[in-house]
Image: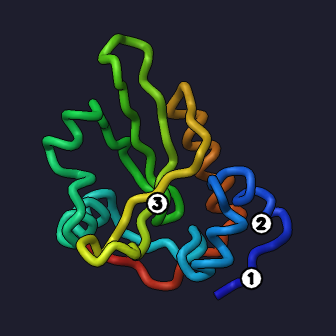
Amino acid sequence: MSKLTSEAHEFLRKEIYGYDQYSKLYPDTMPQNAQAFTSVGALRNAVTDSGSFFFTPSTMRYWRSRIAPGLIGSRFFITSESMTGERGDRRYWVRWVEESDDPDHKLGVYRFESTFDSLQAARAFARKAHALIPFPTKAVQS
């Protein structure tokens, strides 16, 4: 695996809550070790098959969650949620999937701290994350 640059560490330090402590405890579970996927469908299937409820219809309905089409760099994806259900209050998050410490869920879905008002801004952020963080080596297919 490639080493993170100082710029990548600074990016992660800013964008992942508790990055310094987390990376000391779990150095192999940061985004540079995220799972790679060939499609959003493969990602959803893998997460659901691992026992996670993240993509179940009831969870998606509760959070008024939507998944934006397409992956960025085969591992980052974007969701949007609307807690109030009002028009125009939708927020976007850049997320990734990696192995979880939870024995009930083999894969976990994680997100960066930043939220965005538009899909375009979230995609730009995901492209930056992809450019800074080394690429995982094997892709999961559906």
Query: What residue type is disc 1 on?
Result: Lys
Q: Which of the 4 image quarters holds residue 125? A: top right
Query: What residue type is disc 3 on?
Result: Trp
Q: Which residue is mark 1?
A: 3
Q: Position of residue 82 (x, y in %)?
A: 36, 25
Q: Quadrant of the N terminus?
A: bottom right
Which comes before the other along the chain, label 3 or label 1?
1
> Could you say whether the residue bearing mark 3 is in a helix, strand or loop?
strand
Residue found at the very far bottom of the displayed protein: 1
Q: Nearer the viewer, residue 25 or 131?
A: 25
Residue found at the very far right of the displayed protein: 6
Q: Which residue is mark 2?
A: 9
The reply, left or right, for residue 43 in relation to residue 23 is left
Which comes before the other along the chain, label 2 or label 1?
1
Give the Cα distance between marks 2 and 3: 17 Å
Q: Which residue is mark 3?
A: 96
Query: What residue type is disc 2 on?
Result: His
Which comes before the other along the chain, label 2 or label 3?
2
Residue at image x 23%, y 73%? 104
Residue at image x 38%, y 70%? 37
